Amino acid sequence: FQLKYYFAVDNAYVGKKLGILLFPFFRTDWAVRYDNSDAPIPPRSDVNAPDLYIPIMAFVTYILISGFVLGIQGRFTPEQLGIITTNAMAYLIFENIIIFVTKYAMNISQALSLWHSLAYSSYKYVGFVYFIIYFHFSIYHLSLMRYNNSILYFR
């Protein structure tokens, strides 16, 4: 286990991965590649490998953009950032608990580590940020449903 594996990214990887996250329907190869010693290739060299850089940046950006939107609406208080962060973290933890309980109950392979699960379940914040920034609120929920379907396809 090395945490730095999940942060071994470069600009080209980030650009390709963001494209895959927003438009997964155009991708046909989803296999994670392995080297000669059966270790997964780092994300820098394999766009299908999970990383934690994009999810963490998207999570922080989601919190900041949410605060910005609250400020535009005149409802911002510093406590709101804490509430948004706590709620997002609680849902993320709850989602991962459900994933691991389901894996255990269904006797699914434990090859998916906590970090992989955290990475895959946090990619949703990329779509949250994208749709908060680029779409008017009236179509926000429709756009969000489209992105959620993309994430289901991505997984």
Image: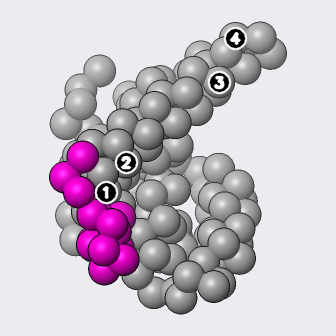
Mark carried by residue 104: 4
Which residue type does callout 1 highlight?
Answer: Ile
Q: Which residue is mark 1?
A: 63
Residue at 24 percent of width and 46 percent of height: 79
Secondary structure beneath disc 3?
A: helix
Image marks 1 and 2: residues in contact by CB distance under 8 Å: yes
Q: Earlier in the sequence, mark 3 or mark 1?
A: 1
Instruction: Give percent across and percent down for residue 63.
Output: 31, 57
**Whole-Å distance between the Cαs marked 4 and 2?**
30 Å
Q: CA distance from mark 1 to mark 4?
A: 32 Å
CA gap between label 3 and label 1 equals 23 Å
Name the residue type under label 3: Ile
Residue pointed to by mark 3: 98
Q: Is residue 68 left or right of residue 130?
A: left
Return the residue at label 2.
84
Q: Considering only order in the chain, which callout, 3 or 4, is on the residue closer to the N terminus?
A: 3
Cα–Cα gap, marks 1 and 2: 7 Å
Magenta span: helix, strand or loop, mainly? helix
Q: Which is more foreground, mark 1 or mark 2? A: 2
Instruction: Give me the residue at 71% from left, 76% from top.
Output: 142
Q: Residues within 10 Å of mark 3 (few under 14, many from 20)?
A: few
> Is the image coloured rainbow, by chain, by secondary structure, or in one colour?
one colour
The reply to whether callout 3 and callout 1 are in contact (CB within 8 Å) is: no
Which residue sits furthest front?
A: 74
